[in-house]
Image: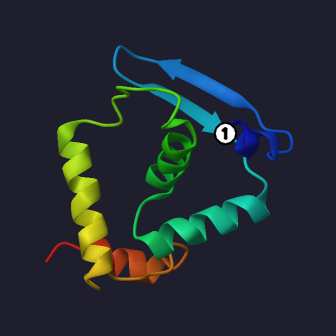
């Protein structure tokens, strides 16, 4: 994943460590973020899931037995990819507050 981090100009990383997870905050250029976010949407996964998949793909031949996510998370990711591949998804503009209200409104 080093090649991806090298292209991030002025990136800073904040790390929070727990017993099971490490959380990083990475600053992307607006152009890079826009392209990565669009690619994640096209694949039907969240932005963090997409970034994790890039990192895993980059190191998969070097490291064995990496715990990627909990079994429940892996099942949810698999279900999301299945939904995307079979056309069971909705697209919306996350900056459109009316769409967001309608999406999350209780019925």
Q: Can you name the residue that lies furthest to the left here?
A: 107
Q: Which residue is drawn at 62% across and 62% down?
A: 36
Question: Looking at the image, how many numbered discs can be counted on the residues?
Answer: 1
Seen from the viewer's position, the closer of residues 23 and 103 is: 23
Q: Residue at x 75, y 42 (%)?
A: 3
Seen from the viewer's position, the closer of residues 3 and 31 is: 3
Q: Which residue is drawn at 33% across and 29% down?
A: 67
Measured from the top left, where is residue 79 in percent x and y? 21, 63
Q: Can you name the residue that lies furthest to the top here?
A: 19
Q: Residue at x 38, y 28 (%)?
A: 66
In the rendered view, tell whether residue 13 sits above or below residue 84: above
In the rendered view, tell whether residue 14 sits above or below residue 8: above
Q: Position of 20 compared to 78: left or right?
A: right
Q: Position of 16 compared to 21: left or right?
A: right
Q: Can you name the residue that lies furthest to the bottom here?
A: 87
How is this picture coloured?
Answer: rainbow
Characterize the local packing of mark 1: few (<14), some (14-19) or many (20 or more) Cα atoms within 10 angstroms.
some
Seen from the viewer's position, the closer of residues 9 and 81 is: 81
Instruction: Check the picture and name the quadrant holding the N terminus.
Output: top right
In the rendered view, tell whether residue 21 sits above or below residue 78: above
The residue that disc 1 covers is 26
Seen from the viewer's position, the closer of residues 99 and 89 is: 89
Q: Which image quadrant for residue 30?
A: bottom right
Q: Position of 20 compared to 95: left or right?
A: left
Measured from the top left, where is residue 73 in percent x and y? 25, 45
Q: Can you name the residue that lies furthest to the right here?
A: 9
- The local secondary structure at tag 1 comes to strand
Instruction: Check the picture and name the quadrant holding the C terminus.
Output: bottom left
């Amino acid at each position: 994943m080093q090649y991806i981090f090298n292209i991030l100009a002025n990136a800073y990383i904040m790390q929070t460590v727990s017993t099971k997870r490490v959380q990083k905050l990475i600053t992307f250029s607006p152009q890079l973020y826009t392209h990565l976010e669009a690619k994640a949407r096209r694949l039907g996964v969240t932005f963090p899931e997409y970034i994790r998949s890039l990192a895993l793909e980059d190191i998969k031949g070097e490291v064995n037995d990496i715990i990627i996510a909990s079994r429940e998370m892996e099942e949810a990711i698999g279900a999301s990819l299945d939904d995307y591949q079979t056309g069971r998804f909705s697209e919306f503009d996350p900056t459109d507050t009316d769409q967001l209200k309608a999406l999350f409104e209780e019925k």
